[in-house]
Amino acid sequence: MRAPHLEAHLEPKLVGDIEGDFYVPAYQRGYRWGRDEVKRLLEDIWESRDQAYYLQPIVVRRFGAEWELVDGQQRLTTLYLIFQYMVREGLQNSGAGYRLRYETREASAAYLIDPDPERAGENIDFFHINEAYACIRDWFESHGHRRQHAANKFYNALFEHVRIIWYEAPEDLNAAELFTRLNIGRIPLTDAELVKALLLSRSR
């Protein structure tokens, strides 16, 4: 039987090395990024494709055999959709090494795998996922006859240069309380501020 993880762990992790099953708990809203945020992520990765680049933190906590995704749902979901696009279009053979599921929105996990535009109006999650996928498609198609070349470069960057700040919170930490602290007012935190907040949450 695996011993509980009682110490916080912080490390940079290549996007291509993220693996496992991630569970989005009920205390979080669904996927809500719009085209501006998705395009900004695509452009940031593309502009840094040949050098080390760090994305905002992903905060997780062990939840049985899964990872509870405490913070970073929007980024991790968008990266998943980018992988899905490249595989569905035949631009790459393998997608993300991880899967996402939702405590209260089971249909959203299936829609991530197959974002059908005909169903985008069924609920707010489907709408935003479809919009993000369409933005990803438009971005790659903007490269015209060099779309395959762009996909190869982008895919390589995810495995060689682009890292997230992986923060594994202690298993005995109250994840819902931490999520609330990190998202009060929906004000994005810098990496340094996030680490400080996490350390403070452990000391209280």
Image: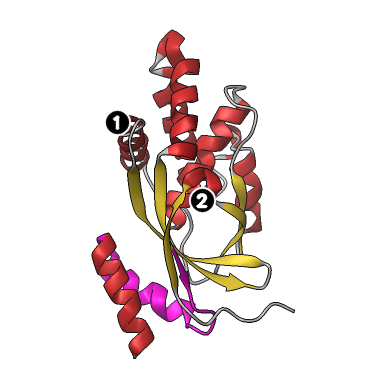
Residue drawn at (46%, 44%) of the image: 78
Chosen colour scheme:
secondary structure
**Mark 2: which amino acid?**
Asp
SS state under label 1: helix
Mark 2 sits on what residue? 125
Binning the other alpha carbons within 10 Å of mark 2 as few (below 14), some (14 to 19) or many (20 upward) gives: many
Residue 103's label in the rendered image is none
Image: 72 above or below 193: above
Residue drawn at (37%, 43%) of the image: 34
Residue drawn at (54%, 48%) of the image: 17
Q: Residue furthest bottom?
A: 204
Image: 98 above or below 193: above
Mark 1 sits on what residue? 47
Viewer-proximal residue among 57 and 69? 57
**Mark 1: which amino acid?**
Glu
Residue 144 sits in quarter: top left
Quarter placement of the N terminus: bottom right
Q: Position of residue 106 (x, y in %)?
A: 65, 57
